[in-house]
Image (cartoon, rainbow, N blue to C red):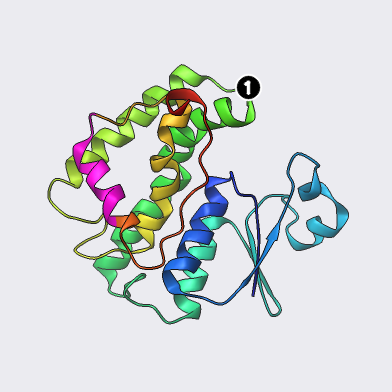
Amino acid sequence: MKLYYHNLSGHSHRALLFLGLLGADYEQAFVDLKKGEHKTEAFLQINPFGQVPVLVDGDAAVSDSNAILVYLAKRFDRKDWLPESAAESARVQRWLSVAAGELAHGPAAARLVTVFGASLDAPLAIKKAHALLGVMNAELANAPWLAGDHPTIADVALYSYVSAAPEGNVDTSGYANVLAWLQRIEALPGFVAFDKTPVGLAA
């Protein structure tokens, strides 16, 4: 099993984090985005979209970070991380959709501006980030984890970009429940930290 990743990619970190939490045995393959390695013919044969992360497991090449989380949970038969009941799996899927939507357009987009110099609307991304954090903070007032009473891939999917939100000039200090949730994830056995960048409010 091999994971193609970039250390400053929050999407890559989702996969790195979950592999760590699972205690999985795998090989890391760093993809240098600055050198355009993700756009080479060899890499595009693995993922035609030219994006990291990609998990290669035997004949399977799984791209998209959320798909990798689902694949790994199924691959290792970890129903604790991806419950199978209708209600529980729907709660997890809801947050995977948030990770691909509100999170991507909020904290992740704001961080793309400061870390990678992306030409995006930073004030709008920061506004969307606070809207998301407000919802998360309210929901985490009633439960320790996003999808219930134990950690699931929903928490893994949201962790990376929320933890790094200050790098995108998103002030998380007013969201006590979110900060406590981050600490709970960081206390899990096998936790893998997300490489920090001294930009934005983290400068």
Observer-nearest of 177 and 138: 177
- The residue under the point 39% across, 41% down is 162
- Amino acid at circle 1: Ser
Q: Position of residue 192 (x, y in %)?
A: 46, 58
Q: Residue at x 69, y 80 (%)?
A: 58
Work out whether 113 lies above or below 10: above
State the image coordinates of residue 108 (x, y, percent, origin top left): 49, 36
Q: Is 145 displayed left or right of 108 in the figure? A: left
Residue closest to the eye, 56 or 163: 163
Percent x, y of residue 135: 25, 38
- Seen in the picture, residue 95 relative to 109 is either above or below; the reply is below
Q: Is residue 178 magenta?
A: yes
Residue lying farthest to the right in this orientation: 41
For mark 1, does the 10 Å Cα neighbourhood hold few (<14), some (14 to 19), or many (20 or more) residues? few
Instruction: Pick the residue in front: 9 or 65.
Output: 9
Left of 43 or right of it: where is 82? left
Question: Circle 1 sits in a helix, a strand or a loop, which is it?
Answer: loop
Question: Residue 199 location, x and y as percent?
Answer: 52, 26
Give the residue at the far left of this rendering. Answer: 142
Residue that carries the numbered disc 1 in the rendered image: 119
Quarter residue 148 falls in: bottom left
Which residues make up the magenta segment? 174-184
